[in-house]
Image (spheres, rainbow, N blue to C red):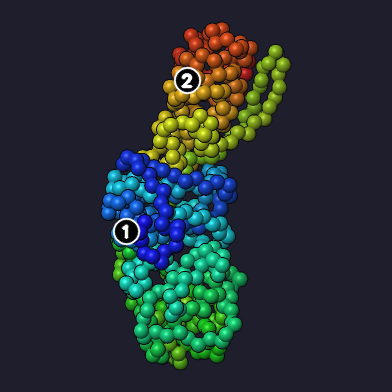
Amino acid sequence: MGNLQPDLALRYANVRYFPNVNGARNCYTLRSLKPGGKYYVRAVFGYGNYDRLNSPPTFDLYVGANYWTTVRIVNGSRAYVFDTIAMLSSSSGADYLQVCLVNKGSGNPFISGLDLRPLHPELYPDSSEAQSLVLLSFFRDDTVGFGFNRYHFGIDYQHFRYPDDPYDRIWQRYQNVSTWTVPGSASGVVVKNPPYDTYDVPSAVMLSASTPLNASATMEIVWSSDLSMDVDADTNLLLLLYFAEVEANASRQFDVLLDSNVTLAAAFSPSYLLTTVVRGTARGLGPHSISLVPTSSSNLPPVISAMEIYLVRPRNESATSSADEFNSTVVSCMEYSFILIEERVFFSATAVMSVQKKYSVKKNWEGDPCSPAAFAWDGLNCSYSPPGPQRIIALYLPSSGLIGEIDPSFGQLTLLQNLNLSHNNLSGPIPDFLGRVTSLILLVDNNPYLCVNDTCNSSPSKNKLAQGLGLGLGLGVPVVILVAAVAVFIR
């Protein structure tokens, strides 16, 4: 990794790469999260010619079932940082988030680091279950070098991050502008955020401000998307500009304009030591400009502390449900005694992931089981009925080397219509919990150690029901009829 910039952190000198075929998906699953929670996700990449091919790859990045960005390594010696703010679905019930790398046939995907941090749910209100925010990269002056894609306007080439920023957002200096200077401020002062604030910018960032040397000068901030970002004419952008007055007894007033003709704020005067956010929206690659134009009544030039610009990324794909939920009454007929049981059954995506782990299933089982449809797991059929979450309705695992008892996770796939477990090495009784999955056709033939409750014994030769008869299931008999043989009835 000797071809990386020498000032980069050690994490960029390491990679995990995934040599696989075009279209393959490799995923990291980040667990123990809060359904409906909001999270800050960062993925970092340092190519550094680790493979000695001098051929930087291009591949796609997904958060869950939804497209995040395309990683285009334009300069192999530079590190690339991609930040997104995503919200977990509350309707699917998922308590995990997956980050997936997808091979596009242009080199092996790789990654150097992956970060996840919880956000307060009221922060960045434009990030929701319907859309995520992707931090934009900008074309940069050569003196900026490695960019973190979020800017303060101080004069020092200093990055602000944790512990100054509790969420470890990385604030990089914008660039060197010879006609700008630092406004005067007293030592030891703190810029506070208002009670209704939804961005929580650190005081250290807000104090790192710039202002023109000439009191009547306009501040121009020109920007456009980095070549590594996939921005087209229809891409929606969210602009967040952060202001605070840091000079005591100052009198300044200015207009905030987008592309010279859209007024984001008129006759604006920042509050003393209090953060004010000016929001705006733009569309397309650019170049775009932000103009801070002093009014005739202003005694001082404009001032600005920081800015962020995000791509607004619609979340068009629904995740596979983790909550196939229904209330049912199950009447269990065991030795002619009837017991009434109320069942509340959960889990679909979580259940099939448990099946994968239990039996070490060797398939393309990475990422969301059903979404997007192009990456759906082999051996699954899903129902796609937007806007709700996807549901698993069929699972085919014949001749898959399954060993051991039928795992309880199968019973949590409550909307299954077909389950094929034939030609494996499953053992033990056919579990009663499969009787709770209504309208299920179950195939379990050619599992020599599988049996029905009272016929179970250690001799596979006596378990004829699971071999020759196949529990009637090889004939495609619904599980309602099968379960009648083991004394469980569904109403």
Q: Is residue 122 left or right of residue 130?
A: right
Residue at 39% from the left image edge and 84% from the top image edge? 180
Residue at 54% from the left image edge and 15% from the top image edge? 449
Depth check: give the residue in front, 447 or 256: 447
Work out whether residue 118 can be spotted: yes
Q: 10 Å neighbourhood of mark 1: few (<14), some, or many (≥20)?
A: many
Which mark is on residue 162?
Answer: none
186 above or below 169?
below
Does dot 1 land on a helix, a strand or a loop?
A: loop
Q: Are marks 2 and 1 in contact (CB under 8 Å)?
A: no
Residue at 27% from the left image edge and 54% from the top image edge? 54
Residue 11 percent coordinates (x, y): 45, 57
Tell me the amino acid under the disc marked 1: Gly
202 above or below 75?
below
Does dot 2 land on a helix, a strand or a loop?
A: loop
Q: Quadrant of residue 341?
A: top right
* N-terminal-most mark, 2 or 1: 1
Depth check: give the residue in front, 360 or 365: 360
Work out whether residue 91 can be spotted: no
Residue at 41% from the left image edge and 66% from the top image edge? 7
Residue 20 percent coordinates (x, y): 34, 40
Residue 98 percent coordinates (x, y): 48, 47
- The residue mark sitting in front, 2 or 1, is 1
Which mark is on residue 76?
Answer: 1
Q: 10 Å neighbourhood of mark 2: few (<14), some, or many (≥20)?
A: many
Q: Quadrant of the C terminus?
A: top right
Residue 276 percent coordinates (x, y): 52, 75
Q: Quadrant of residue 300?
A: bottom left
Residue where numbered disc 2 is placed: 424
Q: Quadrant of the N terminus?
A: bottom left
Tell me the amino acid under the disc marked 2: Asn
121 above or below 184?
above
